[in-house]
Amino acid sequence: MARRATWWTLLSVAVLGVVIVRGGACGACNAERVEPDQRLAAHLDKLCEIADDGAIDPRTGVRRMMKYYGDHGPDMLEAFGATLVTIERIDDDAAHDRRARVARDRIQQPLVACQETWQRFADAVEHDPEASATLERGVTRLGRTLEILFGEEGRSLRGMLAGALARARDAEQVHPRL
């Protein structure tokens, strides 16, 4: 048993050493920190590339777009949320507003740059019944998911909060606290 503990101890120390050395080496380098709005903008650039290819082959474009959202949707949502938190943590109102404008510009730049590509992709999908049906099915499913999660009242924040409170009251009546 002592031998196994020694082996694990050595392995743990080795891993910890690598982490410390790697962290120290990386901390010593001057690598630029990528802000969350920059990460989101990079995803939007990738989606534009997919839309560009999809304008030529809409069926493949729709499938690739859905796969990209499936693979990277959590990262995109995290980057968006982190962008909001980054901005809202700034106490000074003027600095807050400046940072929000930087984020706006970073996020809108790839959208504006890709506007014509998105239009060509949308036109191609609209003229391809199979691609259109695939996209419609995906959007309909997402809509159902959001409706199930947030309910019909979830279309407004006030409605979502009122609905959540009503469901909590109903649950309390069905399962009173002991």
Image (cartoon, rainbow, N blue to C red):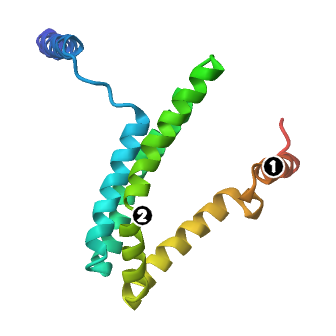
**Residue 63 seen in render:** yes
**Which numbered disc, 1 or 2, marks the residue that appears first in the sequence?**
2
- Out of 102 and 13, give the one closest to the viewer: 102
* Percent position of residue 119, x then y: 42, 73
In the displayed structure, does residue 112 sit left or right of residue 7? right
Q: Where does residue 101 sit, x and y in percent of width and height?
A: 53, 35
- Counting from the top left corner in percent of width and height, residue 36 is at 42, 35
- Which element is circle 2 on? helix
- Label of residue 115 in the image: 2
Q: In which quadrant is the N terminus drawn?
A: top left
Tell me if 31 is positioned left or right of 55 in this view: left
Q: Amino acid at mark 2?
A: Gln
40 and 81: which is toward the camera: 40
Closer to the camera in the image, 91 or 176: 91
* Residue 89 visible to the viewer: no
Is 87 situated above or below 150?
above
- Name the side, left or right, on which 126 lies relative to 14: right
Q: Amino acid at mark 1?
A: Arg
- Total numbered badges shown on the rendered structure: 2
Q: Could you tell me which secondary element the residue under label 1 belongs to?
A: helix
Classify 145 as above or below 55. Answer: above
Q: CA distance from mark 1 to mark 2?
A: 33 Å
152 relative position to 120: left or right: right
Q: Which residue is mark 1?
A: 158
Is the residue 24 above or below the residue 130 in the image?
A: above
Quadrant in the picture for the C terminus: top right
